[in-house]
Structure formats: C-alpha cells, structure tokens
Image: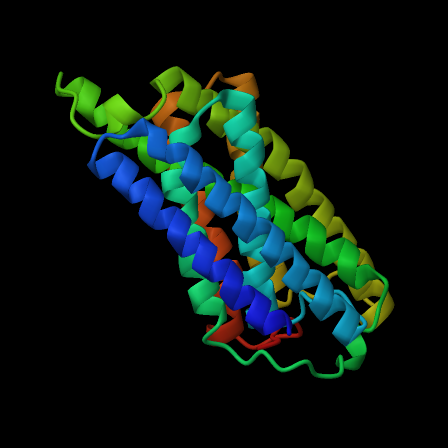
Amino acid sequence: MNVYLLYAALGFYLLSTLTYALSLALNRPVLERPGYYSILTAFVIHLASLITRYCAAGYTPITNVYESLSFLSLCITGFFFYIRRAYRVPMIGCIIAPLVSFILIMSLNFPSEIKPLVPALKSAWLPAHTILSFIGNSIFIVGFFISLVYLAVEKEIKKKRAFFFSEKFPSLSTLDRINYRCMSLGFPFLTAGIITGSMWAGFAWGSYWQWDPKETWSLITWIVYAILFHNRLALGWRGKRTAYMMILGFILIVFTFLGVNFLLKGNHTYI
C-alpha cells in the first residue's frame, strides 16, 4: 500500500514539475499556484505513504536506501514550504519539484520490501538520529540549489544582462539571506544528528566513536559547515564565498549518504 501511495505522490510531484516548467518557459507566473498545490498534494500523499509504512513495519522507516531517499525528499519538500512562505519566493518550487521527483524516482529503483531490523537498528535512538540527520541534510541540500541560483544570478548581473535567472528569481541579497537561514537551521540539526548517532553507537557497539567510514565523513562534513558558519558570523562571509562552501558541503553530504554505502564498508551500510 505504501509503495502505491509513493507512486501517486510521484505523479503529483511530476505534475508540479511540469506546471512550474511551463510557468518559466511561457513566462506565466499565474501557473505557479497550480504548481504549488500539486506539490502540496504530493506532500500529503507522500506523508500518508510514510505513515502507512511505519504502521506496517512497526519501526521508523528510514533504515535502507529506498526509505532514506523517500524520507529525504519529504523533508526537502517540507522545508520548501517554509522557505516559500518566509521569503515569498514562489518560483523556488521550479527547483524543488524536479529535485524531489528525481530523488523519488531514484528511491523506487531500490528494494522496497519491509524486512526485520538487524539487531543494531532495534533501538529508540533510530528515530532520533535518523530524523535529525535527514532534516539537517535536506536543509543543506536546499541551500546547495539556492547557491547555484545565486551564482547564476550573480553571473548575469556581472555581465549586465537579464535573461533567465535574474528576472525570475529573488535578488542576490534575498538569496544570500536564504542561504544563511539554511546554514543556521541545518547546522544544529546536523550537530544533533551526529551527537545522537554517537550515543546510539555507545549503546549498540560499546563505543561512542569507532571512526567508521560514515562517522568519519559525517565529521568531515560537519567541520566544513562549522567553518562556514564561523566565518559567516566572525568574518562576515557573504555571497559567493558562502555559495561555494555550501556546494562543497553538498558534495560531502552526497558522498556520506550514498558514496559510503556503495564504496566503503562499515557498520552503517544498510542497502
């Protein structure tokens, strides 16, 4: 049942993607609202899919690649609603809708069967660690795409021409403020995710830190964002510096999330 709901959600995400694309291509801002309601409908169905899977499995369904990608896309969509409302940037949906659609399509290519948990995952720390970590990652992923838009708008302005990005997306100052909000919200969640993961490791394996590949790369990712956060507050980093660091952080998140699972062996490898 939950898989069918996920397919239904994907249908509405794709509909939203198409609507936003038409809004951009035809320069019809009025089409943004149908795109928004399509992604809102997709989010509700997606959430229902997560709830039904939780009821069927009896545990927080963030234990393999299929479930993780699905939950990540749900978090990204939820954060989009916040950004859209807080900064009044409706056309950000033209980035989020295709992104979430792509992630869901990826998830549906992995096994979706509900299986008994391995002993290490049978813990009350599972929901705390995974939910906090994935919320943090989703916020930083949105920050990555905001950074790409920032660099594109900045390039157009520098060339003294308005073409695609600078006409349809917010100003550089607004994009920079959104990036800072992504940074200031994502970093505490990432930190809390690492701390709860360490506590979980202490109970599961008798050691709070084992330099497991995923632990190591999570720490490297945290250090990059910590440097960015510090330099933003202490040195006043703005604009392109922030954007480039957010892009580097995104690359590390992707490697930590997927690369470690497929390229490196460790205690966190659950396909």
Left or right side of 19 for 123: right
Up-down relation of residue 3 to residue 240 (above or below): below
- In percent of width and height, residue 261 lies at 53, 72
Q: Is residue 162 above or below residue 67?
A: above
Q: How many marks?
A: 0
Q: Quadrant of the N terminus?
A: bottom right
Query: Where residue 123 sits: x, y (%)?
Result: 84, 68
- On the question of residue 137 being in view, the answer is no
| Res. 242 in view | yes
Horizontally, residue 76 falls left or right of residue 89, namely right
User: What colouring style does the render use?
Assistant: rainbow
Q: Quadrant of the C terminus?
A: bottom right
What residue sits 46% from the left and 38% below the top? 36
The residue lying at 57 percent from left, 50 percent from top is 43
Q: Quadrant of residue 118?
A: bottom right
Residue for point 45% across, 47% down: 250
Q: Nearer the viewer, residue 240 or 23?
A: 23
Taking 128 as reference, is 87 left or right? left
Question: Is 115 situated above or below 198?
Answer: below
Q: Between 217 and 124, which is closer to the camera in this rendering?
A: 124
Q: Residue 189, image x and y in percent?
A: 67, 42
* Residue 19 image position (x, y, % from top left): 34, 44
